[in-house]
Image (spheres, rainbow, N blue to C red):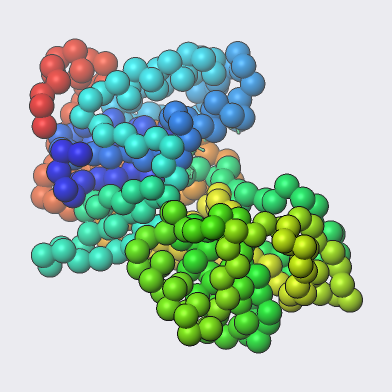
């Protein structure tokens, strides 16, 4: 890491994230971090496009002018990935792969707003954040069958939770811990985790969990897995692998993955009634220096070109706020040819 605090951290390494990162380089932003949950950039393209798929520049008939510095003419799945590979060779962008961002918390350091970005294994600090996680994210589901008659009582977030229920939270990460101790204030809560100790919790969450457990405000059931679920008179009978069962009113799974709207809400970003983020003409959300780019900013389908344009506008807005306005007209390849890489 070049600096303790990044100037711009980009969550998601798809076209929106890559476009933002390259615009930031071209506009002279110094400390840039790109965080991607999978082991390589452009997970949506790799996972959902068929091999040799034609990639249309004007996707679904959307004719959008490219406004920024990153060219995109379309091609195939493979040529598109190759092109993004080349862009990300740029050494002024720090990358963190295999790093799913779990939370982004606004905090203050020496009188300045800073975001603390936490993945399952590490934390980063940044002055600004661009969320470009796309719309394909889904919460992970268990491998055993969930009886259809119980679906209303099985959740992947806190939306349907009320009070005075007997709740089982499943998982060993920070989301599971936070759900468990939040719910424990008004409910009878057990947190079940398949391992015998927590390895991915931040110290604060681990401390709160231990305190709640010590005061019997919630119960920790470690080293235990769930084998199956059954409908027991309209409640959920959970059969554990230690041979015991317990009846619950509700189960909350927090076993990785999240829907985009849950992610935004968790970060404190305001969303409208359709679950889309609210942002201004610079893609800035209700939080200072927190932006959204790419598909996540659209009600329905975006496109690669639209995502690249977002990056351009966001970086301009970001620099304008810092009193630095650059107006490069050269396109990205020309820029890199004429500007040998400087050390930041
Ligand atoms: C089958 C299919 C075909 C398409 N064909 C075309 C086409 O021909 N032309 C075109 O212009 N558009 C096409 N699109 C649309 C285009 O792919 C999207 O508009 C574009 O990928 C949006 O880019 P994005 O960066 O917003 O999101 P995405 O491409 O979805 O990238 C989001 C990235 O964020 C990562 N991520 C998610 N959550 C986290 C997290 N918590 N922490 C860290 N990283 C995270 C993901 O792994 C992913 O790499 C197609 C879409 C699909 C599904």
Number of labels in the image equals 0
Can you say whether 53 is above or below 177 in the image? above
134 to the left or right of 17: right
Q: Residue at coordinates 26% horizontally, 34% vertically from top-left?
A: 94
145 to the left or right of 51: right
On the question of residue 335 being in view, the answer is: yes
Can you say whether 104 is above or below 342 in the image? below
Q: Residue at coordinates 55% horizontally, 21% vertically from top-left?
A: 56
68 to the left or right of 7: right
Residue farthest to the right, as pictured: 233
Q: Residue at coordinates 34% horizontally, 17% vertically from top-left?
A: 86
| Foreground of the two, 63 or 112 | 112
Q: Tell me where residue 257 appears, x and y as whole percent.
A: 55, 49
Can you say whether 24 is above or below 239 in the image? above
Quadrant for the N terminus in the image: top left
| Foreground of the two, 278 or 232 | 232
Quadrant for the C terminus in the image: top left
Q: Tell me where residue 182 appears, x and y as whole percent.
A: 50, 76
On the question of residue 259 being in view, the answer is: no
230 to the left or right of 80: right
Q: Tell me where residue 242 appears, x and y as whole percent.
A: 72, 61
| Foreground of the two, 188 or 315 | 188
Q: Residue at coordinates 41% horizontally, 74% vertically from top-left?
A: 208
Name which quarter of the figure residue 286 lies in.
bottom left
């Amino acid at each position: 890491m070049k600096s303790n605090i990044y100037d711009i951290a980009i969550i998601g390494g798809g076209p929106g994230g890559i476009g933002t990162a390259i615009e930031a380089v071209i506009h002279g932003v110094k400390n840039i971090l790109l965080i991607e949950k999978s082991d390589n950039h452009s997970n949506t393209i790799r996972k959902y496009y068929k091999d040799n798929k034609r990639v249309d520049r004007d996707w679904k008939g959307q004719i959008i002018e490219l406004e920024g510095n990153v060219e995109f003419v379309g091609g195939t799945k493979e040529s598109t990935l190759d092109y993004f590979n080349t862009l990300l060779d740029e050494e002024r962008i720090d990358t963190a792969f295999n790093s799913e961002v779990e939370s982004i918390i606004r905090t203050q350091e020496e009188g300045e707003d800073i975001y603390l970005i936490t993945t399952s294994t590490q934390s980063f600090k940044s002055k600004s954040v661009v969320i470009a996680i796309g719309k394909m994210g889904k919460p992970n589901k268990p491998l055993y069958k969930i009886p259809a008659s119980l679906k209303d009582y099985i959740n992947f977030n806190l939306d349907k939770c009320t009070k005075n229920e007997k709740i089982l939270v499943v998982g060993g990460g920070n989301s599971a811990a936070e759900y468990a101790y939040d719910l424990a204030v008004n409910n009878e809560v057990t947190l079940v985790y398949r391992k015998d100790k927590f390895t991915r919790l931040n110290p604060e969450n681990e401390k709160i969990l231990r305190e709640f457990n010590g005061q019997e405000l919630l119960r920790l059931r470690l080293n235990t897995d769930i084998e199956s679920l059954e409908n027991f008179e309209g409640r959920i009978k959970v059969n554990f692998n230690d041979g015991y069962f317990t009846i619950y009113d509700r189960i909350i799974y927090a076993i990785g993955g999240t829907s985009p709207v849950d992610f935004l809400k968790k970060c404190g970003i305001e969303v409208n009634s359709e679950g889309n983020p609210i942002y201004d003409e610079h893609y800035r959300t209700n939080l200072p220096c927190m932006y959204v780019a790419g598909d996540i900013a659209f009600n329905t389908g975006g496109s690669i070109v639209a995502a690249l344009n977002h990056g351009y506008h966001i970086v301009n807005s970001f620099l304008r706020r810092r009193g630095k306005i650059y107006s490069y007209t050269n396109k990205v390849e020309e820029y890199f040819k004429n500007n040998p890489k400087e050390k930041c």
